[in-house]
């Protein structure tokens, strides 16, 4: 682990990607199989592989307790160090150096020992036991190694690495084409296993495995119809953007499993979809959205919320909030039960590199039990094409009339890129764009909100510096129940207090709506949002998926480019934003 931590700091110290890749490749070549698998997973900033359902369940408070317990350092010193660095790992390193923590080098834990302790921490119940396990591990680690351990545990690597770079390093270390590494990574969904296959020269044996969820393809926000046509035109594919929860459906024989966006098994929450899929005559993987749907119409997201997290929902809840699966993609397809093969002998052909047009054609041949006269559990995403701004705007208002959130505009020639946010899919929603931000600070509110932490300061990710940079502050637009629950969470995850303001662990993603983006020195990002509102909590999103400074810049430049034509749900309003001015004129 000491060598891993040294490497992480050397990688952080250079901004040149070719140098980062070189350093990583050189290091990876020296590792045996076990250490390689672990080192690579740690380099993606995770204690466990991404598709692993485990999480250490450890937060800032537990890490701080472990450090205090082991070193005798004061918690206030840690909070102060955090304020200096805005980085927990750096703060822990500082504090340990400050108290002269220097265990003998031979005690330093190996990568498998660190991974083993992470597994024990996950299995331990209660913060006291977790903290004791971590304290024992940190006691053997010098300050730099401790920094490395905390970087991985907190999920805040901050060394300017993205998965693409780690893949490039694997390719370079074991002398394989980058495409072969990427392909194996896509199919296995596990970068540690991919590295081991590369080391053994067996990348071509990687297969799509059912019941190992693939990462989901992501969409980029689009400012307006003109930008969409510029990027994906002249003719684009337009699907409704459904307001439910993303879900990957795997089916083999009569076994069916549903996976959420964060790759958790959620089959137990939606028995009606599992039951309806069991009799399908094929094996394969669907991508789609689960929606609350009753009497032939989509119910608002808030209705679906009653079903989230409820395993084995009682019949009364199933009747009150029935759900359907809206399929929009097919990621793998195999033969079905008709061919009498044992489950082990069945294979599923990956379709990730097949163009969307063909994937959709195959999806439409699957005989899904579509909703018909109130029966059935499936629907196919509404699909049309558009080749003009007016066409897109019409599709947008039609989608809204069907009670959907907006549009997903897709390039019909695009492959399915797991885990990537490219320009193959663009989302166009609500009247104006929204961005996903990470809450970094909270304050008690005013008036009826005086007892709760309802004012949020939020940030986007600056990929160049791998830091969160603030962009605004807003009173929460959440429900009272959500604010109360979040208040408890923020209280438990406060890092330091400054009068009314608390710095909190940067873990919560919120979707922020706004009217205009402005240049401003008030926030670290150099931008501010006009009339920001918290539109929704995004507990399904990881902070690493928050929007980036680059996206904000692109949206800002889009707005500057001229008048924007935007369509709202009911009346068609055209909001003209005079370029460069802060005036807004509304014409109906
Ligand atoms: P957002 O969650 O705002 O980043 O928007 C992306 C999400 O929209 C996806 O993760 C899906 O859950 C959802 N979505 C709804 N309809 C579609 C569709 N037709 N195609 C792809 N994603 C969709």
Image (cartoon, rainbow, N blue to C red):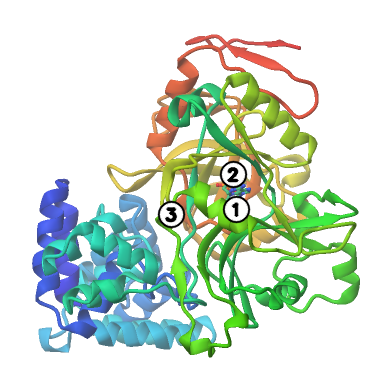
**193 to 297, vertically: above or below:** below
Quick check: marks 2 and 1 in contact, CB under 8 Å? yes
Residue drawn at x 60%, y 33% is 385
C-alpha distance separating marks 2 and 1: 7 Å
Q: Secondary structure at mark 3?
A: loop
* Residue 451 percent location from the top left of the image: 71, 52
Mark 2 — residue?
Answer: 511
Structural crowding at the residue carrying mark 2, measured as other residues with C-alpha within 10 Å and reported as few (<14), some (14–19) or many (≥20): some
Image side of residue 27 versus residue 206, left or right: left
Q: Is residue 428 visible?
A: yes
Mark 1 CB near ligand 1 (8 Å cut): yes
Image side of residue 312 versus residue 235, left or right: right
C-alpha distance separating marks 1 and 3: 31 Å
Mark 3 CB near ligand 1 (8 Å cut): no
**567 to 305, vertically: above or below:** above
Give the quarter of the image for residue 244. bottom right
Structural crowding at the residue carrying mark 3, measured as other residues with C-alpha within 10 Å and reported as few (<14), some (14–19) or many (≥20): some
Query: Which labelled disc corresponds to residue 354?
Result: 3
* Residue 472 percent location from the top left of the image: 52, 35
């Amino acid at each position: 682990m000491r060598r891993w931590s040294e490497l992480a700091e050397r990688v952080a110290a250079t901004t040149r990607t070719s140098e980062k890749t070189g350093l990583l490749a050189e290091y990876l070549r020296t590792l045996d199989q076990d250490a390689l698998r672990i080192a690579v997973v740690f380099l993606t900033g995770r204690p466990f592989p991404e598709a692993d359902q485990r999480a250490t369940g450890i937060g800032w408070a537990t890490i701080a307790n472990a450090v205090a317990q082991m070193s005798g350092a004061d918690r206030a010193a840690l909070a102060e160090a955090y304020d200096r660095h805005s980085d927990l790992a750096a703060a822990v390193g500082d504090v340990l150096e400050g108290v002269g923590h220097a265990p003998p080098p031979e005690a330093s834990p190996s990568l498998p020992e660190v991974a083993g302790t992470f597994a024990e921490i996950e299995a331990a119940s209660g913060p006291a036991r977790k903290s004791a396990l971590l304290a024992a591990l940190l006691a053997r680690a010098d300050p730099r190694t401790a920094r490395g351990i905390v970087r991985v545990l907190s999920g805040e690597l901050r060394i300017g690495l993205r998965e693409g770079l780690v893949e490039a390093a694997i390719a370079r270390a074991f002398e394989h084409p980058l495409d072969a590494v990427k392909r194996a990574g896509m199919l296995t969904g596990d970068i540690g296993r991919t590295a081991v296959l590369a080391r053994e020269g067996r990348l071509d044996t990687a297969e799509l495995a059912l019941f190992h969820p693939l990462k989901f393809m992501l969409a980029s926000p689009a400012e307006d119809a003109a930008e969409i046509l510029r990027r994906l035109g002249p003719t684009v594919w337009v699907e409704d953007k459904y307001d439910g929860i993303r879900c990957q459906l795997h089916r083999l024989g009569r076994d069916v499993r549903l996976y959420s966006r964060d790759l958790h098994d959620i089959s137990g929450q939606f028995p009606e979809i599992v039951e309806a899929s069991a009799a399908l005559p094929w094996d394969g993987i669907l991508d789609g959205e689960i929606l609350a749907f009753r009497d032939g119409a989509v119910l608002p997201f808030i209705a679906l919320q009653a079903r989230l997290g409820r395993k084995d929902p009682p019949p009364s809840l199933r009747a009150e909030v029935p759900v359907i699966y809206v399929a929009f993609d097919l990621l793998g397809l195999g033969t079905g039960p008709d061919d009498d093969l044992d489950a082990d002998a069945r294979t599923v052909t990956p379709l990730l590199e097949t163009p969307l047009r063909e994937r959709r054609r195959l999806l439409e041949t699957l005989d899904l039990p579509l909703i018909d006269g109130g029966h059935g559990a499936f629907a196919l995403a509404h699909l049309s094409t558009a080749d003009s701004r007016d066409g897109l705007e019409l599709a947008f208002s039609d989608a809204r009339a069907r009670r959907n959130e907006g549009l997903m505009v897709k390039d019909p020639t695009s492959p399915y890129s797991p885990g990537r946010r490219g320009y193959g899919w663009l989302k166009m929603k609500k009247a104006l764009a929204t961005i996903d931000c990470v809450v970094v600070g909270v304050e008690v509110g005013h008036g009826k909100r005086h007892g709760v932490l309802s004012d949020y300061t939020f940030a986007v990710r600056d990929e160049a510096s791998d830091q969160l940079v603030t962009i605004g502050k807003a009173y929460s637009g959440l429900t009272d129940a959500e604010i109360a629950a979040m208040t408890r969470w923020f209280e438990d995850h406060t890092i330091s207090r400054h009068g009314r303001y608390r710095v909190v662990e940067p873990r919560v993603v919120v979707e922020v709506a706004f009217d205009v983006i402005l240049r401003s020195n008030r926030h670290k990002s150099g931008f501010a949002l006009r009339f920001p509102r918290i539109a929704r909590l995004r507990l399904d999103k990881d902070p690493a998926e928050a929007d980036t400074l680059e996206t904000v810049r692109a949206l800002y430049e889009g707005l500057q480019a001229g008048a924007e034509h935007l369509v709202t749900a009911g009346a068609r309003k055209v909001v003209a934003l005079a370029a460069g001015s802060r005036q807004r004129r509304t014409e109906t």
